[in-house]
Amino acid sequence: IVLILLKYGATVNNCVWDEESEFYMASHNGQLDVLNILLDKFYALVQEKNICYTLFYAACCGGKLEVVHKWYFPTMDLNSVIEFVPTLNKCELMYPLYAACQGRFLDIAVFLIENGASVTKEICESFPEFTTFLIQTKFQTSNLRAKKDFDLEEKSLKGIIPGWFKSNLGSAGEETEYPIEVDISINLSKNLLTDLPDGVLWSLQGLTLLKAPENPIKFISDALDISVLASNRLTSLDLSYCQLEKVSSHIFNLPGLVELNLSHNNLVTLGRDQDLSDAWSCKKLQLLNVSHNRLIYIPPGIKICADMKTFNANHNQLTQTFPPWQCPMHDLDLSHNQLSTFLPSADQFWNWTLKWLKLDHNRLDELTESIVRLSSLIYLDVSHNLIRILPAAPLWHCLLSIFNLSNNLLGL
C-alpha cells in the first residue's frame, strides 16, 4: 500500500521527529519494511544525528529490536534525552533505556545496557520488578540452588536495588525467597555508582563476595541497624580504585571477612573509631590491602586479626609502625612511606611465618636486628632508605633469596 501511495504522488511529513510523522510511526510500530521504503526514498530527511536518535527512541518505545538496530550507530550517546520532545511533562525521562523498561522490552533493555546505557536511579525506583527480572535473567551467571553469581561489571550502573539479589522473580512477577544457606556473589566493578545501598552491603542475606572497584564512591555509611552485622556473611570485599574519603568502622566489624581491598583511594583513617583498640572485631581477616591512600598510621584495632597473612600498606604517609601481634603474617609491604624505624620485636611474633618484607622508599637509618633474625624470611627490600650500617653477622638467621639494599648510605 505504501509503495502504491508513493507511486501516485503521496509524500511525507518533513518534520520526521514528530510523533505523527510517517518515519516516527513506522519506527514506533516496528514496521521495518515500511521504514526501509521511506529510507530509500526520503533518506535526506534523516541525515542529522539528533533526528536519528529521536527515531531510535521511538523504536525503543515500540519494542521491536530489529528497528532499534536499524537506527543505532556506535557513537550514539544512549544516555541523553531526546531533543524533539512532544511534551515538557517528564521530558527528563525521555531516554531509550527508560522507555524500554517502561514497555518491559527485555531484549531491547539488554541491548542498550550492553552498549553503554546507564541504569539510572530513576529506572531502579520506577521499575523494580522489571529490572529485577532483567538482572536475574540476563546477568545472573550462576543459578545453582546454593549459589547465585551476578556479573554486572562495566554496565554503566548509576543505581542498584537490593531486590535484584534478594529473591527469585519469575516472569509472572511472583517472588520466591532464596533459601537461607544460599551464597551470593556480586561483581559491580567499573560502574558509575556513588554509593552502596544499606540493603546490599550490610543486610543482604547470603552475600559472601562483593566487588565494586572503579566506582566514584566517596563514602561508605554505617549500617542503619548494627544488629545485622552479626549475621553478615561477607568474606571478600573489594572497594579499590574508588574515590573513598571515609569508610564506616562497621567494615572492620564484619565477623566473617577474610579479604578486604581498600587500595587506591583517598583514605586518611580506617574507620571513624580508629584510635580505639577494640574498634575492630574482624578476627578472620587474612588479607588487608590499604595501599595507595593517605594513611598516617595503622589503628591498634588491627591486632584483633589473629589470622592475618598479607598486609599491604605501601604508598601511604605512615610515620610510625604498629606493634606486632600474634598472627601468621606471610607478606608485609610498608614500602613508599615515611618510616624511620621498624618493629623491634617482629621476630618474636613472625619468626616462622614472615617470608616477604618490603620496606623500600622509607627513611630507615638502620637495618633493625629484628628483621635479620626472622628465620623464615626469603625476600627483603630495604632499598632507597638512609641505612648506614648492617647488624653483626651472628645476628643473621634469615636465608634470603632476594636482598635489595641499593640506594642507601652504606660506608658514608
Image (cartoon, grey):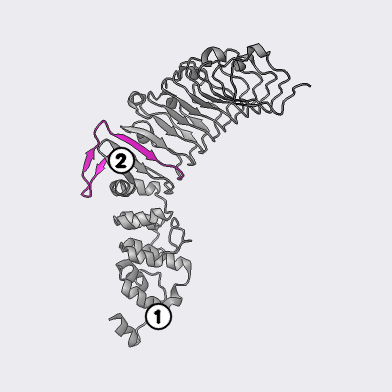
| On screen, residue 110 above or below 321 | below
Name the secondary structure under disc 2. helix
Residue plotted at (40% across, 44% down): 159
Q: Which residues are magenta?
A: 162-191
Tell which circle, 1 or 2, labels the residue nearer the N-terminal end. 1
Q: Secondary structure at mark 1?
A: helix
Please rate how many residues cluster around mark 1, counting C-alpha atoms within 10 Å: few if below 14, some from 14 to 19, many from 20: few
- The amino acid on which the numbered mark 1 sits, given as a three-letter code, is Lys
- Compare residues 388 and 256 and report the one nearer the observer: 388
Residue 332 seen from this side: yes
Residue 90 at x, y percent in the picture: 38, 55
Q: Quadrant of residue 223?
A: top left
Label 1 sits on residue: 41
Between the residue at mark 1 and the residue at mark 2, the CA separation in whole angstroms equals: 48 Å
Q: What is the x, y in percent for residue 238?
A: 45, 35
Where in the figure is residue 371, as x and y percent of width and height? 60, 17
Query: Which residue: 42% across, 22% down?
Result: 282
Task: Give the residue furthest to the right.
Answer: 412
On the image, the x and y values in percent for residue 214 come to 49, 41
Going by the numbered disc 2, the residue's amino acid type is: Gly
Q: Residue furthest bottom?
A: 8
Say which mark, if any, is on residue 141. none
Residue 61 falls inside the magenta stretch:
no
Question: Which is more toward the observer, 324 or 198?
Answer: 324
Q: Is residue 346 left or right of residue 14?
A: right
- Badge 2 crowding class, 10 Å Cα cut-off, few under 14, some 14 to 19, many 20 or more, is some
Which corner quadrant of the image does residue 97 belong to? bottom left
Res. 163 mark:
2
Q: Is residue 168 magenta?
A: yes
For image coordinates 48% across by 30% down, the residue present is 247
Q: Is residue 115 above or below residue 398?
A: below
